[in-house]
Amino acid sequence: MKPTEIESFLAIVQFGNLTKAAHSLFISQSTLSQRLKALEDELEITLLKRKKGQDFITLTPAGDKFYKIAKKFERLAIEAKEIKTEQEEDTLIVGAVDSIHNFVLPSIYNQIKKKYPKTKLVLKTHQSDELYTLIEKQEIDIGFSLQERVLNRFSVKRMFEEKMVLVKKRGIEDINIIHNSDLDPEYELYVNWGMNFRSWHEKWWGIEGTRGIQVDTASLMMLFLKNPRNWAIVPISMAKQFEKEYDVSIYPLYDEAPNRICYAVFPKDSEKLPIIENCILNRGMET
């Protein structure tokens, strides 16, 4: 017994006419008749009858009993679809790079849970270019990328811009300004912060300038910043948190790296727009 067969049976009962029923389902009359026959053959009963010379179709006694069962089936099918819809509405999947998740978005997440306590938050960490692929595949509801792209069916909104600073293990001496040329690339903890950052980085340390350790998470960076020789260029949001929790200081740099820009990417017709607008787009972000 297929849902399409029950749907066809109910349409025939509703319209009392094969032609009108087929038209309402956007199928041919022959397809409708085939579905009805398949249903009757499986049940081994005759559900409908039509007198010769008349277009109007009526229920047989068995058909009348089955009609009540078919209506229950229809209601159950609707309820099953509602479960899927509710599940989709109650889950917000957010994709972002590691530093955005850890140092910018926590207050946003708290706000979402406060205003929408029944909403399940799913957080996924990916690189900037991967986030656009995931949003196009509808595997995330909103992404926070360090890259800007133009997509037809998606909104790309510039969310914030933040300063990039130099961090090192805290020293006892006062330092006014550290010149870029005084930083040894052998001890750099390198993170690829985007195209503008790479261009600035190459200006000072060359194309092969990444000779230290390349990391992609804050936890890895903190592990290596324990070495007083190591250094890193990081967003100010990350640097401030490092200063609070670890033996790390922010140092002034002669030629500062270009600011980091974060973009929010989401479908223009997303069902999650109320949450996205109320808790993210209209609220803004502090760094």
Image (cartoon, helix red, strand yellow):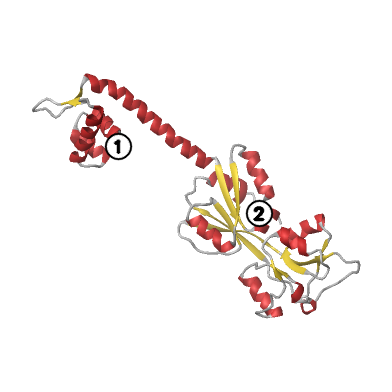
Q: Which mark is residue 67?
A: none
Q: Which mark is residue 4?
A: 1
Q: Amino acid at mark 2?
A: His
Quadrant of res 121: top right
The local crowd at label 1, few if under 14, some if 14 to 19, many if 20 or more residues have their Cα within 10 Å, is some
Label 1 vs 2, first from the N-terminus = 1
Q: Quadrant of residue 195?
A: bottom right
Q: Residue 60's x, y, as percent?
A: 20, 21
**Number of numbered discs on residues:** 2
Q: Are marks 1 and 2 in contact (CB under 8 Å)?
A: no
Mark linked to residue 101: 2
Q: Residue 67 falls in which quadrant of the image? A: top left
Q: Which residue type does callout 1 highlight?
A: Thr
Q: Secondary structure at mark 1?
A: helix
Residue at image position (32%, 22%) is 68
Q: Mark 2 falls on what kind of element?
A: helix
Q: Position of residue 287 (x, y in %)?
A: 71, 57
Mark 1 vs mark 2: in front:
1
Residue 123 in percent (x, y) is at 61, 50
Q: Residue furthest top?
A: 61
